[in-house]
Image (spheres, grey):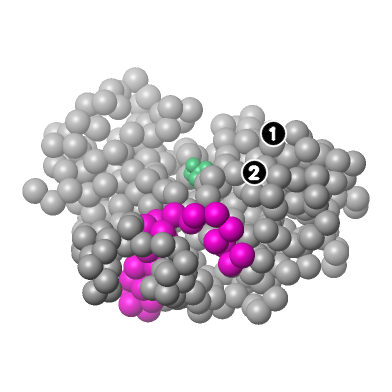
Amino acid sequence: MKIYNFSAGPAHLPDTVLDATKKAVIEYRGTGMSVMEMSHRSEPIVDLFHKTTSRVRTLLDVPSDYHVLWLQGGASMQFSMVPMNLLSKRSTADYIETGAWSTKAITECNRVATANVIASSKEEIFNYIPKEYNQNIESKYLHITSNNTIYGTQYKVFPKPRNTDGYLVVDMSSDIFSRSINVSDFGLIYAGAQKNMGPAGVTLVIVRDDLVINELDHLPTMMRYDTHVKKDSMFNTPPVLSVFVVNETLKWIADQGGVVSIENSNKIMSDKLYTEIERNTLFRSPVAIEDRSTMNVAFVFNDRSMDDNEFLQFCDARGLKTLKGHRSVGGFRASIYNAMPIEGVDALIKAMQDYEDR
Ligand SMILES: *Cc1c(COP(=O)(O)O)cnc(C)c1O
């Protein structure tokens, strides 16, 4: 039976990526060694990092005054590194709270500086993206989460920074490479790899050159962006295997026609699923129509007294795995990242229809 993994992360990877990884784990590029056994200073691995970085630059059309970094510690580490590097103790930044990940970013900012929460959809269990707010004139940046993995909301239009010296910082962990973006709209972009571009263990940071400060002697060396810029993301031993898998995934994205065609197929898949949720008498979406994510499709029973577990087991028996919604929302969540084939979405829609007919 074909298995479709709807997990929110770590998530499904393309078969070609898994095949290439299987080979590289045994032997890498005729060296007689596993990719995991090779020094990060060796020519093949330095070359791997350069190739992966240049794929990011090509796929997202990254301007030359931006650095591409491969760091560890996940997006969660960026919740701290961003304010540590971009703010001083007395400075402030604006944050829009659109879910649990934004809340964590706010908490970490408040440890080192001041986060102004200028809008929040917490009262409505984060089922929409707030669009009315005033940015503070003294704030250095505005932080947003582009896709809210848990609640299934997504920015369709990004906010504008308050003026020419303000800038946006965005957590794109769950929708990076799923749609075309204009990198120059942001000062800093970060994303853990494990949702849409690879396995856990590596985090992509794209940061504008003028935001990489060299006089941060009070910070631990590893926490400074300039450390990693100067050493090409090899200040310490980097997660080579994770970067290998990211490189293969980016290759796969390019083979699909790049980010624009990925965006189109994601739109087709998510539209299909939302259409069925609307049509099906059993289910509804808890999310505001204009903010519905193309990546994480949340849905619940119309009649909340129905047993979620029964439907989950029904799906599981058909090979449709990890559809349980996050505990804070309940119901179901189908994460249909780039690597999900349309057949997976069709199989889920069929299961929803068969469940309705039963
Ligand atoms: C998963 C996720 C995170 C956390 O990423 P880690 O790599 O586990 O730190 C942060 N933000 C968003 C939007 C996520 O989806």
Along the viewing direction, whichever of 83 and 280 lies nearer the viewer: 83
Q: Is mark 2 within 8 Å of ligand 1?
A: yes
Along the viewing direction, whichever of 232 and 305 lies nearer the viewer: 232
- In the visual, does 330 lie left or right of 290? left
Circle nearer the N terminus (1, 2) = 2
Residue occupying image coordinates x 55% and y 61%: 234
Residue occupying image coordinates x 8% and y 48%: 1
Q: Which residues are magenta?
A: 231-257
Q: Which residue is mark 2?
A: 79
Q: Are marks 1 and 2 in contact (CB under 8 Å)?
A: yes
Q: Is residue 16 magenta?
A: no
Helix, strand or loop status at disc 1? helix
Asked if residue 102 is positioned above or below residue 206 in the image, the reply reads above
Q: How far from the left and from the top, in percent, is residue 51?
A: 45, 75
Q: CA distance from mark 1 to mark 2?
A: 8 Å
Residue 56 appears anywhere in the view: no
Indicate the amino acid at tag 2. Phe
Residue occupying image coordinates x 83% and y 56%: 215
Q: Which residue is mark 1?
A: 107
Along the viewing direction, whichever of 310 and 321 lies nearer the viewer: 321
Q: How far from the left and from the top, in percent, is residue 44?
A: 38, 73
Residue occupying image coordinates x 37% and y 40%: 333
Q: How far from the left and from the top, in percent, is residue 341?
A: 26, 61
Indicate the amino acid at tag 1. Thr
